[in-house]
Image (cartoon, rainbow, N blue to C red):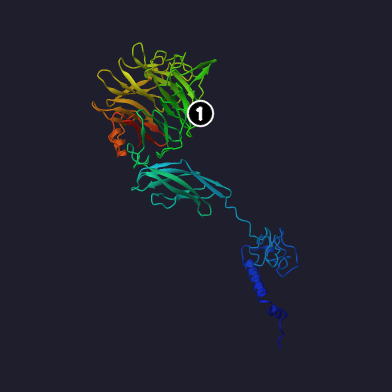
């Protein structure tokens, strides 16, 4: 005779859902015992226990567990998940939740999340230039924080225009260089692409959208500037151009100022007030331009910001020792270096024509000079500032028409270390046509001899003492009248070349006088010919109407401009 097990009978009489729950709990307990997460008290006595009130932070009304100390335990039961069982096993001490399974520390919502740390990244620069088929290196800065100190993978999102090789940034690397290569068939223009930086497991990632400008070779037409189908022009017979530090381009004619963004698109909302009818020289500053103009019949120097508003701190007039000095005429030139603007102008009761202002308007009272008392008002005085705030000025003496270059210290006194007692004389009869400053504060000038007429580049280099100073000359193309120093001490000359109807030509040289053959065609660009490429639907230009181009430092290009038949024209050339 066989005895029936009471427990078997009870099991048989249990409802199906409860039976299933018991089986799942048993399987979970077994799994816990076999698991690497099960140890010690976590897997001990699971035979049942008294009712209780839940875990440390009650997530449900459960009892002491489904067994004596529950199937959870300290290691597995900080939530309703873990390995404590599907019916709410868990709790700080293995106390199970209620039948609804919501017990355990943390309201039964799962175990404590792991700290994966954080990853951030950035790039140096906001615009990256590249030639078709060429490459550009982009510096990517990485910042790891929290618990993340691992390797970072840096590359480019899939792109039809650009490609990169995957870069592995070791845990100690805070910056890596990503080389981006442009497709050889890309046209000039602005392209958007995205750099990605991510952890090796893909848990952490960051995306960096960037703008890439596919440009042309040095000395070629900038096809990203303006509307090629309808190029911009304005009315006018006079023009001047300046570029501010943000890369905005300003063009003035006799009546107004126009403002363009880096794409050559006209800013329709820029409308400065009170310009008057006669405009003088203009120079770009941090935000907007400083220029000379006639307002209410009085000469002024004013500052217009990029939003069109006027900076009231600028007037060009100033006070010193309780005396006010006012402009008597428009300035002959403005030159800006860092936070100063050097002004060449005539003031009442002041004989010197050189004055130094801060870019935000006030006079720099530390600069006082009695130099240049004997110069004319015909524009023969022009000057530059070097990196040490010394003034280098060239002038023609009224007494004998001889020309010289002087250097003044920041306080306005003559720098006797320069030349002979602070003055470098040109040879008898020679004209100094223009000057500029090299990156090491040495001097370059365009000099023209009287007979025979020869135009030369003069490079003055300061030595350890006056005896070791050197002056070297390099012959230039006849007709050069202007020079400016560009980044890397590249020298750009402007001149009218030829004996009859000479075209305006710009040329690039190194500081040793050697032509930069890679610029334009054998180192030269004919502005009239290039303007015809840009203004394809316009009449032929007056070949004498082009001015010295302006250096757009932020855009690494030249802004060329000129006038013809009552119109003002503007276009861009790559550097």
Q: Residue at x 54, y 48 (%)?
A: 119
- How many numbered marks appear? 1
Badge 1 density bin: few <14, some 14–19, many ≥20, Cα 10 Å: some
Q: Is residue 431 left or right of residue 24?
A: left
Residue 526 seen from this side: no
- The image shows residue 167 at horizontal and vertical percentages of 45, 49
Front in this rendered view, residue 256 or 222: 256
For residue 81, above or below residue 555: below
- The image shows residue 49 at horizontal and vertical percentages of 74, 68
Front in this rendered view, residue 159 or 33: 159
For residue 254, above or below residue 64: above
Q: In which quarter of the image is the N terminus?
A: bottom right
Front in this rendered view, residue 232 or 359: 232
- The image shows residue 395 at horizontal and vertical percentages of 37, 17
**Residue picked out by circle 1:** 311
For residue 36, above or below residue 371: below
Q: What element carries label 1?
A: loop
Q: Is residue 124 left or right of residue 231?
A: right
- The image shows residue 552 at horizontal and vertical percentages of 40, 34
Residue 424 seen from this side: yes
Q: Which residue is drawn at 71% across and 79% down?
A: 10
Q: Is residue 332 left or right of residue 450?
A: right
Residue placed farthest to the bottom in the image? 1
């Amino acid at each position: 005779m066989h005895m029936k097990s009471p427990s078997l009978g009870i099991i048989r009489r249990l409802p199906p859902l409860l039976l299933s729950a018991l089986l799942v709990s048993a399987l979970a307990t077994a799994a816990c015992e076999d698991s690497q997460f099960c140890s010690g008290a976590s897997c001990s006595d699971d035979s049942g226990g008294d009712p209780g009130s839940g875990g440390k932070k009650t997530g449900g009304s459960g009892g002491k567990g489904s067994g004596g100390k529950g199937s959870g335990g300290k290691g597995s039961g900080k939530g309703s998940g873990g390995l404590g069982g599907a019916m709410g096993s868990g709790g700080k001490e293995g106390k199970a939740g209620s039948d609804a399974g919501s017990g355990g520390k943390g309201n039964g919502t799962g175990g404590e999340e792991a700290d994966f740390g954080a990853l951030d990244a950035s790039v140096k620069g906001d615009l990256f230039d590249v030639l078709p088929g060429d490459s550009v290196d982009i510096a990517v800065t990485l910042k790891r924080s929290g618990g993340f100190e691992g390797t970072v993978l840096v590359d480019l999102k899939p792109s039809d225009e650009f490609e990169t090789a995957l870069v592995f940034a070791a845990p100690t690397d805070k910056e890596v260089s990503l080389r981006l290569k442009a497709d050889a068939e890309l046209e000039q223009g602005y392209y958007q692409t995205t750099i990605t930086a991510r952890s090796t497991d893909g848990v952490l990632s960051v995306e960096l959208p960037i703008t890439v400008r596919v440009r042309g070779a040095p000395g070629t037409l900038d096809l990203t500037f303006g509307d090629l189908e309808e190029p911009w022009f304005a009315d006018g017979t006079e023009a001047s151009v300046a570029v501010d530090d943000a890369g905005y381009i300003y063009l003035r004619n006799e009546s107004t100022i126009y403002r363009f963004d880096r794409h050559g698109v006209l800013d329709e909302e820029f409308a400065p007030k009170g310009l008057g009818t006669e405009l003088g020289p203009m120079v770009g500053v941090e935000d907007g331009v400083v220029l000379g103009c006639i307002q209410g019949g009085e000469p002024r120097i004013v500052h217009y910001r990029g939003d069109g508003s006027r900076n009231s701190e600028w007037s060009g007039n100033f006070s010193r020792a309780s005396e006010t000095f006012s402009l008597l005429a428009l300035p002959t030139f403005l030159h800006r270096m860092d936070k100063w603007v050097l002004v060449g102008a005539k003031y009442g009761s002041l004989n010197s024509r050189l004055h130094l202002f801060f870019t935000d308007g006030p006079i720099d009272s530390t600069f006082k000079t009695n130099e240049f008392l004997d110069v004319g008002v015909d524009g023969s005085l022009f000057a530059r500032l070097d990196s040490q705030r010394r003034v280098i000025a060239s002038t023609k003496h009224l007494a004998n028409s001889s020309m010289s270059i002087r250097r003044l210290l920041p306080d306005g006194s003559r720098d006797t270390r320069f030349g002979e007692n602070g003055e470098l004389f040109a040879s008898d009869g020679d004209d100094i046509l223009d000057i500029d400053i090299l990156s090491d504060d040495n001097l370059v000038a365009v000099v023209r001899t009287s007979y025979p007429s020869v135009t030369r580049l003069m490079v003055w280099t300061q030595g350890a003492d006056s005896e070791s100073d050197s002056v070297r000359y390099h012959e230039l193309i006849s007709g050069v009248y202007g020079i400016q120093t560009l980044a890397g001490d590249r020298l750009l000359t402007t001149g009218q070349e030829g004996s009859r109807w000479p075209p305006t030509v710009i040329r690039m040289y190194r500081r040793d006088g050697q032509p930069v053959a890679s610029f334009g065609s054998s180192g030269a660009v004919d502005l009239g010919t290039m303007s015809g490429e840009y203004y394809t639907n316009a009449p032929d230009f007056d070949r004498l109407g082009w001015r010295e181009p302006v250096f757009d430092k932020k855009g690494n290009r030249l802004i060329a401009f000129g006038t013809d038949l009552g119109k003002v024209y503007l276009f861009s050339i790559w550097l």
